[in-house]
Image (spheres, coloured by chain):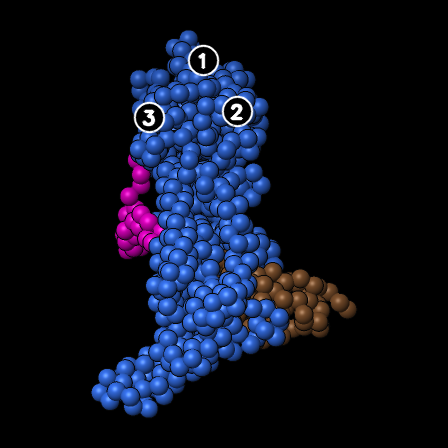
Chain colours: A brown, B blue
C-alpha cells in the first residue's frame, strides 16, 4: 500500500521568499515525500506524499522546525 | 487556528518589547552614570533577547547548508559585540526583529482578501442518510445526497434546492451582496449563507469540486503565477545575499575595516526588492477576487491595464440572455392585453418550454388573474393548448394556428412581421379558434449596461464594439441603449474571431463573452473576459479574466484594479531599487552604519508592503446589509429594460 496523498497546508507567516527553498528542501528530505511545493505569495504548501510513511502531522512539524506554523486545509 | 497565530505573534512582540525596554534602560543608565558597567550589560542583554530567535533560524539554515539573512545578521551582531559596539548590536537585532514582526502582520493583510474566501469554505454538513440527520465533514458528502441547510447556515455543497425557500448571500462567489431568492430547482453554491428559511439541497458537487474551491484554487494559481520581471528579481535575490557576504569578506581583506564589513552584512538582504512585485500582485488579484473578478495572473494583470478596445458578444453580457415578455398586443376589441396574458399564462403554467416561464412571470408581476387550465396538450415545437374555464386556448406559432384551423388575418400577420423584425420571438394566443392577441418576448438589457459602458469610456477605453450573431436590428438597439457606437452583426463564431483579429491590428483588445459560441474569439483576444455567473467553467480554459457577478461595470472595475496594481508594483520596484542603491552608496561612503542601515532596510520593506496593502481598500463600496428589507419581501427589482 503506497498510495500517494496530496496534502495542502497553509501558513500566513512567510515574510521573505527565502523561506520557500528552505521549507521545500526540508519537506523533500522526509521519507515518502514525492514532491513539495511552497508558494510564498499565497502561503500555500503543497505536498505529495505516501501517508503511511509521512503523516500530515509529520509535515506540519517539519515546517515548524524551519520556523513556520502551518495548518492543514481541505483544499 | 487563528488563536495559535495570535499567541505566536504575541510572543514575537514580547521579544521585541523586552529588548526595547532593555535598550531604553541601557540608554538611561548610560546617560545618568556615564562609564558605568550597566550600560553595555543592558545592551548586550537586549541583543541576546532579540537575537536568540534570529540565531535559532540561522542555525536551522546552516544545518541545511544555506546562508540566509538571519546568518548575516547573527554574524554582524556578534561581531559588533566583540568590537565593543554594543549599541549597534542591540539596535540591529531589535530593528531586525521588530521589522520582521511588523512585516509578517502587514503581509498577512495583503493576503487577507483570499483568507476571507478560504474562511467561507464550509466545514460540516447535515446530511440525510437513511432517514436520519447526520453531521459529517462537508467534503465527505457525496453527490446525489440531500443536505439540510438551516437558516443562517453556510451551504455545505454545490447543489439544487429540492425543498424550501430562502435567500442566499452569494458575495463569496459573485462579489455581489444583494441576497438572491432560492426556491426548488434553483442552484445554490457551497460557502454562500442562507437567511429566512430551511432548505433541502441535493448535492451536485462537494469538497474541492465546489465552485468556491475552484475559485480559491484559480485565484491562488493566479497569485502564484510569476510575471517575467518577478522571475528575474527572484534570481537576483538568490545571488544577492551570497554576493554581499562575499563583498563583506573582500572589503575586510582589503581595508581591514571590520565595521564596514559588518555593515555590509546587515544590508545583505534584498528584502524589499524580492517582495515588491509579489505583494502588489497578491493584493491586487485578491482585491479583484473579492469583487467577483478573477484575473488569471500577473501577466494578464499587466495586459488588462493597457486595454484600449473592448468588444462585447452581446447576448449574456450587455443583455441577460434571458427572455422576458416585451409586448402584449391584443388584436380584438373585446379582449384586453391583461386577459390575453392571463389566458396564455394559464396554459403555459403547465408547459416546460423555455419560453413558458417568462409568460407566467409576466402575468404574475402584472397582477393578471390566475386561471386554472385543464386538458393540457403539447404540440412539439409549435405550442401548447388547454381548456381554461371552459374556453379552448392555444398558444404558439403561426403553424400551430393553421394546424388548429385558426385563421391568421393580414393585420395579425403584419404585427407578427413587425415584432420579429425587432428581433423578438412572438407567440400567438387564440381563444375559441380566434386569434385574440400576440405575446412577444425579447432578451433583456442589463440594468447597468449603460453605466458600465460609460465607465469604460471614462477608464480610457476608446473603442467599444458589439460583435454578435444576432440581427443588425437587435444589435443596434442594444448598442444605442448601452451607448456603444460600433456594431458588427450576423457574425458566425469564426467571423467574431476574425473581427477581433482585425481590431487587434490597431489596439489592445479585450473580448467579453459568456462563453457560449464565442470561445475562439475569447482565446484570440489580448484579454479574454468570461462573463456571468456561469463563466467559471469556461474561464478555466480560455479566458484570462472571469467576471462572476454579471455586472457590466465590473469590466471597468477590472481595468481599474489592473491599472492600480501595475502602478503600485512599479512604485514598489522603484522604492526598493532606490533603497538598495542608497544603502550601498551610503555604506561605501561611510555615511551609513549598522543600525542606520538596518533601519532604512526594514523601513523600505514595510513601505513596500503597506503600499501594496492599499490596494485592498480600492473602490470599497458601502456594503450595507439589505437583509432586513429583503426579509419583508420588499426587494426593489431593477426596472427591466427589454430590448
Q: Is residue A47 magenta?
A: no
Q: Residues within 10 Å of mark 2 (few under 14, many from 20)?
A: some
> In this picture, which residue range is highlighted in magenta?
B612-641
Q: Mark number for residue B389?
A: none
Query: Which residue has dot 3 on it?
Result: B483
Of the 4 image quadrants, the one containing the C terminus of chain B is top left
Question: Is B428 left or right of A54, judged from the image as shown?
Answer: left
Residue closest to the eye, B135 or B82: B82
Disc 3 chain ID: B
Disc 2 chain ID: B
Mark 1 to mark 2: distance in Å?
47 Å
**Magenta region's main secondary structure?**
loop
Mark 3 to mark 2: distance in Å?
23 Å
Query: Which residue has dot 2 on it?
Result: B501
User: Residue A55 appears in which quarter of the rendering?
Assistant: bottom right
Residue at horizontal 39 percent and vertical 84 percent from the top? B44
Name of the residue lying farthest toward the bottom: B37
Looking at the picture, does residue B590 appear above or below residue A54?
Answer: above
> What SS does tag 1 mark?
loop
Residue at horizontal 39 percent and vertical 70 percent from the top? B594
> What SS does tag 3 mark?
loop
In this view, the mark in front (1 or 3):
3
Which x, y percent locates residue B296?
A: 51, 45
Mark 1 or mark 3, earlier in chain: 1
Label pair 1/2, CB-CB below 8 angstroms: no
Amino acid at each position: 500500500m503506497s498510495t500517494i496523498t496530496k496534502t495542502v497546508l497553509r501558513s500566513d507567516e512567510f515574510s521573505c521568499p527565502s523561506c520557500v527553498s528552505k521549507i521545500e528542501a526540508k519537506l523533500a528530505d522526509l521519507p515518502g515525500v514525492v514532491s513539495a511545493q511552497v508558494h510564498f505569495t499565497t502561503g500555500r504548501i503543497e505536498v505529495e506524499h505516501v501517508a503511511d510513511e509521512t503523516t500530515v502531522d509529520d509535515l506540519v512539524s517539519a515546517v515548524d522546525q524551519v520556523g513556520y506554523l502551518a495548518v492543514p486545509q481541505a483544499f | 487556528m487563528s488563536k495559535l497565530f495570535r499567541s505566536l505573534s504575541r510572543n514575537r512582540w514580547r521579544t521585541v518589547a523586552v529588548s526595547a525596554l532593555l535598550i531604553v534602560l541601557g540608554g538611561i543608565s548610560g546617560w545618568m552614570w556615564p562609564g558605568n558597567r550597566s550600560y553595555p550589560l543592558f545592551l548586550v542583554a537586549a541583543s541576546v533577547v532579540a537575537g536568540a530567535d534570529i540565531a535559532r533560524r540561522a542555525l536551522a539554515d546552516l544545518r541545511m547548508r544555506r546562508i540566509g539573512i538571519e546568518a548575516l545578521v547573527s554574524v554582524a551582531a556578534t561581531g559588533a559585540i566583540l568590537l565593543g559596539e554594543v549599541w549597534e548590536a542591540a539596535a540591529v537585532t531589535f530593528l531586525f526583529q521588530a521589522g520582521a514582526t511588523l512585516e509578517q502582520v502587514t503581509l498577512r493583510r495583503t493576503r487577507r482578501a483570499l483568507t476571507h474566501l478560504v474562511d467561507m469554505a464550509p466545514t460540516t454538513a447535515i446530511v440525510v442518510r437513511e432517514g436520519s440527520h447526520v453531521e459529517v465533514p462537508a467534503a465527505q458528502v457525496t453527490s446525489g445526497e440531500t443536505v439540510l441547510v438551516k437558516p443562517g447556515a453556510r451551504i455545505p455543497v454545490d447543489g439544487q434546492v429540492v425543498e424550501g425557500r430562502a435567500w442566499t448571500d452569494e458575495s463569496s462567489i459573485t462579489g455581489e451582496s444583494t441576497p438572491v431568492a432560492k426556491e426548488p430547482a434553483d442552484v445554490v453554491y457551497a460557502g454562500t449563507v442562507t437567511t429566512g428559511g430551511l432548505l433541502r439541497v441535493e448535492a451536485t458537487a462537494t469538497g474541492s469540486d465546489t465552485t468556491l474551491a475552484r475559485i480559491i484554487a484559480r485565484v491562488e494559481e493566479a497569485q502564484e503565477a510569476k510575471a517575467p520581471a518577478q522571475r528575474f528579481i527572484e534570481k537576483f535575490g538568490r545571488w544577492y545575499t551570497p554576493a554581499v557576504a562575499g563583498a563583506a569578506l573582500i572589503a575586510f581583506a582589503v581595508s581591514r575595516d571590520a565595521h564596514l564589513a559588518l555593515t555590509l552584512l546587515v544590508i545583505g538582504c534584498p528584502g524589499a526588492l524580492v517582495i515588491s512585485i509579489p505583494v502588489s500582485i497578491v493584493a491586487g488579484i485578491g482585491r479583484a477576487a473579492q469583487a467577483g473578478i478573477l484575473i488569471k495572473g500577473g501577466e494578464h494583470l499587466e495586459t488588462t491595464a493597457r486595454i484600449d478596445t473592448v468588444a462585447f458578444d452581446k447576448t449574456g453580457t450587455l443583455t441577460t440572455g434571458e427572455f422576458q415578455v416585451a409586448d402584449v398586443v391584443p388584436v380584438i376589441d373585446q379582449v384586453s392585453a391583461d386577459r390575453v396574458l392571463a389566458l396564455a399564462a394559464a396554459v403555459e403554467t403547465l408547459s416546460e418550454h423555455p419560453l413558458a416561464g417568462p409568460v407566467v412571470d409576466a402575468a404574475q408581476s402584472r397582477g393578471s388573474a390566475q386561471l386554472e387550465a385543464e386538458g393540457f396538450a403539447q404540440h412539439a415545437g409549435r405550442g401548447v393548448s388547454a381548456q381554461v374555464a371552459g374556453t379552448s386556448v392555444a398558444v404558439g406559432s403561426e403553424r400551430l394556428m393553421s394546424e388548429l384551423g385558426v385563421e391568421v388575418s393580414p393585420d395579425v400577420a403584419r404585427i407578427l412581421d413587425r415584432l420579429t423584425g425587432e428581433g423578438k420571438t412572438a407567440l400567438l394566443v387564440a381563444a375559441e379558434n380566434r386569434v385574440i392577441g400576440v405575446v412577444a418576448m425579447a432578451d433583456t438589457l442589463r440594468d447597468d449596461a449603460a453605466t458600465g459602458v460609460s465607465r469604460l469610456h471614462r477608464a480610457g477605453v476608446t473603442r467599444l464594439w458589439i460583435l454578435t450573431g444576432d440581427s443588425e436590428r437587435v444589435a443596434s438597439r442594444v448598442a444605442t441603449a448601452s451607448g456603444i457606437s460600433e456594431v458588427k452583426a450576423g457574425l458566425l463564431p469564426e467571423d467574431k474571431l476574425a473581427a477581433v483579429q482585425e481590431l487587434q491590428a490597431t489596439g489592445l483588445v479585450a473580448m467579453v463573452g459568456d462563453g457560449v459560441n464565442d470561445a475562439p474569439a475569447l482565446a484570440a483576444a489580448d484579454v479574454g473576459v468570461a462573463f456571468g455567473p456561469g463563466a467559471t467553467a469556461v474561464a478555466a480554459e480560455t479566458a484570462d479574466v472571469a467576471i462572476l457577478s454579471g455586472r457590466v461595470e465590473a469590466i471597468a472595475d477590472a481595468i481599474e484594479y489592473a491599472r492600480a496594481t501595475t502602478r503600485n508594483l512599479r512604485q514598489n520596484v522603484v522604492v526598493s531599487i532606490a533603497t538598495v542603491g542608497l544603502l550601498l552608496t551610503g555604506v561605501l561612503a561611510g555615511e551609513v552604519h549598522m543600525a542606520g542601515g538596518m533601519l532604512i532596510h526594514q523601513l523600505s520593506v514595510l513601505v513596500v508592503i503597506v503600499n501594496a496593502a492599499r490596494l485592498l481598500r480600492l473602490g470599497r463600496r458601502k456594503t450595507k446589509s439589505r437583509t432586513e428589507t429583503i426579509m419583508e419581501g420588499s426587494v426593489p427589482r431593477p426596472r427591466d429594460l427589454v430590448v
